[in-house]
Image (tube, rainbow, N blue to C red):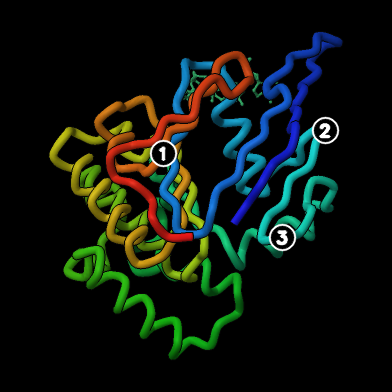
Amino acid sequence: MLRTLNLDKKYTTDEVETTALNRVSFEIKQGEFVAIMGPSGCGKSTLLNIIGLLDNPSGGEFYFLDKEVSKFSERQRADLRKENIGFVFQSFNLIDELTVAENIELPLIYLKMPSAEIKKRVDEVMEQMQIAHRRNHFPQQLSGGQQQRVAIARAVISKPKLILADEPTGNLDSAHGQEVMNLLTELNEAGTTIVMVTHSPSDAEYAHRIIRLFDGEIVTENINARSFAKE
Ligand code: ADP
Ligand code: ADP
């Protein structure tokens, strides 16, 4: 699915240089569920932004679906991103002015899919996420758990190969958090690769593997009980 070799990321603000990632190398296979953990400021968001084709590294190689993408233009990254990646955030990032159904269909509108096909897919994914009864509600009328299910529906509507989740349970109580983790696990078992940043050891147990970052470097890669068998 993706592979990095000696990935570096430096930020320069007011002539002060920060090294956010330092020679980070790893591989994530199609179908894996990987958790990224580490203290605040260790580079997790930076790494997720690069994997998500939102930002380029300063150095090193990054292969996404066998393409070397580290020097792609914003336009090239956007095309690859829209086709292949769904995002789930801690703060849901739904559009308050749009209904549940309208939020969910957005990625397909960007992909210029015919409207009959859009309607069919939105209905399917709303059923799957058990949110169909709320289709005409606005995000602010929903609980946190429901908002995150809408966000996951929006992330999966374009059938991406990769889902990137940044602290997906960070704003949820433990029952709703578990519900979200179960949904992500189901998506993974159906074949979607998942990379998730988390502070929660119990959420990380849903993953096959944990990549631990410290000061911009990988310190350990732990294998979890839920092992990854597929080649
Ligand atoms: P984490 O500790 O896992 O990074 P958050 O992403 O919520 O959790 O970030 C923690 C703090 O760091 C927040 O106050 C956030 O505003 C700040 N922060 C996160 N990303 C950046 C960034 N790219 N630039 C500056 N500040 C950031
Ligand atoms: P994490 O997500 O693990 O909290 P980040 O990737 O947000 O870590 O940040 C890693 C380091 O890079 C931190 O020292 C942070 O302050 C710095 N950083 C992140 N984004 C920016 C940015 N846009 N400009 C300057 N420094 C940044």
Image point (55%, 48%), residue name: 28
Among numbered discs 2 and 1, the one appearing first in the sequence: 2
Say if disc 3 is inside 8 Å of ligand 2: no
Is 36 positioned to the left or the right of 216 in the image? Answer: left
Q: Residues within 10 Å of mark 2 (few under 14, many from 20)?
A: some
Among numbered discs 3 and 1, the one appearing first in the sequence: 3
Which residue corresponds to mark 3? 66
Q: Nearer the viewer, mark 2 or mark 1?
A: 1
- Distance from label 2 to label 1 (Cα)? 25 Å
Image point (34%, 46%), residue name: 227
Say if disc 2 is inside 8 Å of ligand 2: no
Q: Nearer the viewer, residue 83 or 94?
A: 83
Report x, y in % for residue 180: 26, 48
Q: Nearer the viewer, residue 32 or 56?
A: 32
Say if disc 1 is inside 8 Å of ligand 2: no
Task: Residue at the far left: name it.
Answer: 175
- In the displayed structure, 23 sits above or below 152; it is above
Q: Nearer the viewer, residue 228 or 162?
A: 228
Q: Residues within 10 Å of mark 3 (few under 14, many from 20)?
A: few
Image point (73%, 17%), residue name: 19
Which residue corresponds to mark 1? 209
- Distance from label 2 to label 3 (Cα)? 18 Å
Report x, y in % for residue 53: 67, 49
Among numbered discs 2 and 3, the one appearing first in the sequence: 2
Q: Which amino acid does the dot numbered 1 rest on?
A: Arg
Residue 59: mark in rendering: 2
- In the displayed structure, 140 sits above or below 170; it is below
Quarter of image, ligand 2: top right
Secondary element under disc 2, as helix, strand or loop, is strand
Q: Is any part of residue 176 visible from this angle?
A: yes
Q: Is any part of residue 103 visible from this angle?
A: no
